[in-house]
Image (tube, coloured by chain):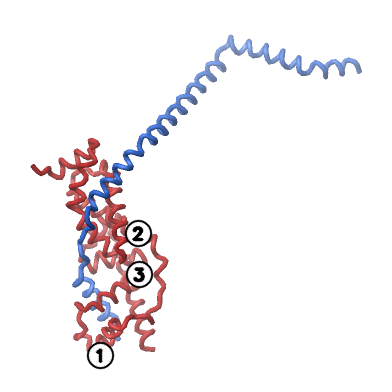
Chain colours: A red, B blue
Amino acid sequence: MEQTEAELIAAVLRGNAASFEPLVQRYSPRVFATARRYARRESEVEDISQEVWLKAFEKLKSFRGEAPFEHWLMRLTVRTCYDFLRGHQRNRESSFSDLTEPENDWLERFVAQPETASENAAAAKLLVERILEQLSSPARLVITLLEIEDRSVKEIAQLTGWSVPLVKVRAFRARAEMRKILAKIAMDKYL
Amino acid sequence: MNIAELQKKLLAAARANPPGDRVPYAFEKRVVALLAARTAADPLALWVRGLWRAAVSCVAIALLLGAWAFFNPAASSKTDDLSQNFENTLLASVDQSDQAQ
């Protein structure tokens, strides 16, 4: 018979590390999907996910079972991703003159007729990834959670450990930062 | 170029293309193996913890003995005599030279 989540956690806390395996198996897809929002290289995604699980094992004693395990784990995942972003800020300053041809085409199409530039295009996806990489760590985190994952300010506050006013301030700054980057692209390209 | 519109469009693009949730083969086995390796390394940590406890116990005993020696009157009078004798012996040559002058 399959053990419940609470039973598995209790077994791990009693010292049975093997009971951790079904938990890793069950929740890894969510951890990987979250990590892929912040890291592009697959090796980095794996490193983040592994770090999340090692931390989860170490901190399992602090899980009180009041909220679902998944919520607790997602908090840990988001914070680990944020630490990753803070540690990998070196590549932020790059030029937009090296946009690929599909990215340039998509931008041209957007300038000519905004409604014809599809958001499902692979070029749009690459372009947005490139822009997100240019953002500061808090800006990238808040834009991802608020605008892309469509989470509420309260949820973001719980996930990040920031206060609600701080999330609002950072969201405001993040949008401005993103607009500034987009304006730079426009300037590089058309001036 | 309408920057606000471009921003909206790009964010919509990011929403329309969620990342995949594929997990590498046997990832959970790797995590558990890593945890097992850490647990195997634990005897060393136990030794270190034990040695620290022993060090703390030794300091506590030393402090207790020091306090006992300091506050015990019989011991302190003996110590006074000993120190006086030691001082006399050490300064004997100086005393002799003073007397000779």
- Give SS at disc 1: helix
Residue farthest to the front, as pictured: B25
Disc 3 and disc 2: Cα gap in Å? 14 Å
Q: Quadrant of the N terminus of chain A?
A: top left
Q: Residues within 10 Å of mark 3 (few under 14, many from 20)?
A: many
**Residue A189 sits in which quadrant?**
bottom left
Q: Which percent across, then down, holds residue A57?
A: 27, 45
Alpha-carbon distance for marks 3 and 1?
27 Å
Quadrant of the image occupied by residue B86: top right
Q: Is residue B57 left or right of residue B83?
A: left
| Classed neighbour count for the residue bearing mark 2: other residues with Cα under 10 Å, few (<14), some (14–19), many (≥20) | some
Subunit of label 3 = A
Q: How many marks?
A: 3
What residue would you read off at disc 2? A84
Q: Chain of mark 2?
A: A
Q: Secondary structure at mark 2?
A: helix
> Can residue A46 be seen in this snapshot?
yes
Q: Residue furthest right?
A: B101
Task: Please give the residue where the numbered disc 3 appears in the rendered image.
Answer: A135
Q: Which residue is mark 1?
A: A112
Q: Position of residue A141 (x, y in %)?
A: 30, 64
